[in-house]
Image (cartoon, grey):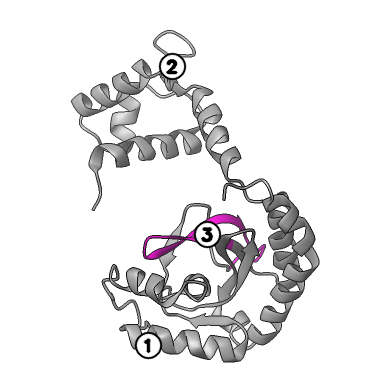
């Protein structure tokens, strides 16, 4: 379920992040396809709250630094250790593929940090993107860390939409994937959610948080390399473990 007003605020922020200059009410309305009256009301409300202003009279609106301060406070309360970004940057260099860290968000895995591949044909991902937990290696690497009743709670939220012929379509299929991953030593996927995408994931222990790290890219490059990719991830986690745990020491319990 999507709340339109909330979605519009986020869409407006994304609009300014791409535009990178002030915009008038007419420009916002036309560019986003919003009715003029709705645009006027939304922008007026955000201005009253101190999150938009006019850098120059009648030259358009632009976000204030209040957004940055707010987001920084939120991020500082539960950050990823700096070592986590260094780790995925190293993995991305060694594998040549997009590498990310994810956490569980309802029945989805959400990316908290991403380093994209330098290849022209690559897995395009960004912070905040979500993938179904059951239909991705990155999600199943998190599910595997939950107790059985915790996984069942997630399963009850699943719609079991079929994204491809390889999408797990029931609880037993997911549990079977988890058992195979335990025997194999890593989680893997092949076009379960996104066509022609192969992924390899491992749990990422940072304090008491249940995270995972994934390397993903085109099937043509990544499918046969999955065992080697898993070993690359495993070595990187081990190499950065001390710094990861030190960075997690200040997290909330």
Distance, label 2 to label 1, CA atoms, is 52 Å
Mark carried by residue 173:
1
Label 3, residues with CA under 10 Å away: few <14, some 14-19, many ≥20: some
Secondary structure category for the residue under label 2 = strand
In the picture shown, does residue 14 fall above or below 43?
below
Q: In this view, does 170 lie to the left or right of 109?
A: left
Which residue does the numbered mark 2 point to in the structure image?
53
Q: Can residue 165 be seen here?
A: no
Q: In this view, does 93 lie to the left or right of 16?
A: right
The residue range painted magenta reads: 101-121
Reading the chain from its start, which is encountered first: label 2 or label 1? Answer: 2
Q: In which quarter of the image is residue 87?
A: bottom right
In the picture shown, does residue 187 fall above or below 204?
below
In this rendering, the label closer to the viewer, 2 or 1: 1
Reading the chain from its start, which is encountered first: label 3 or label 1? Answer: 3
Q: Does the magenta stretch include residue 120?
A: yes
Distance, label 3 to label 1, CA atoms, is 26 Å
Image coords of residue 200 (percent x, y) = 59, 77
- The residue lying at 63 percent from left, 67 percent from top is 204
- Say if mark 3 contacts mark 1, CB within 8 Å: no
Q: Which residue is most to the front? A: 253
Q: Is residue 48 left or right of residue 114?
A: left
Q: Does the magenta stretch include residue 103?
A: yes
Mark carried by residue 63:
none
Q: Quadrant of residue 8?
A: top left
Q: Which residue is most to the top? A: 57
Mark carried by residue 125:
3
């Amino acid at each position: 379920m999507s709340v339109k007003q909330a979605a519009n605020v986020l869409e407006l922020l994304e609009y300014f992040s791409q535009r990178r200059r002030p915009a008038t009410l007419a420009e916002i309305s036309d560019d986003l396809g919003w009715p003029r009256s709705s645009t006027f009301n939304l922008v007026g409300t955000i201005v009253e709250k101190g999150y938009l202003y006019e850098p120059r009279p009648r030259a358009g609106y632009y976000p204030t630094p209040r957004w940055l301060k707010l987001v920084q406070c939120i991020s500082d309360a539960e950050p990823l250790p700096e070592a986590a970004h260094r780790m995925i940057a190293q993995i991305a260099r060694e594998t040549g593929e997009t590498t990310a860290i994810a956490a569980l968000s309802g029945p989805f895995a959400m990316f908290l940090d991403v380093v994209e591949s330098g290849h022209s044909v690559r897995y395009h991902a960004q912070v905040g993107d979500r993938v179904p937990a059951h239909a991705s290696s990155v999600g199943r690497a998190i599910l595997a860390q939950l107790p059985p009743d915790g996984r069942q709670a997630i399963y009850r939220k699943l719609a079991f939409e079929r994204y491809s012929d390889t999408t797990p379509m029931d609880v037993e299929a997911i549990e079977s994937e988890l058992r195979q991953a335990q025997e194999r030593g890593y989680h893997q996927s092949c076009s379960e959610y996104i066509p022609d995408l192969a992924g390899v994931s491992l749990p990422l222990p940072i304090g008491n948080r249940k995270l995972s790290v994934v390397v993903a890219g085109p099937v043509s490059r990544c499918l046969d390399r999955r065992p080697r990719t898993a070993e690359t991830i495993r070595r990187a986690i081990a190499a950065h473990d001390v710094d990861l745990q030190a960075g997690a020491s200040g997290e909330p319990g």
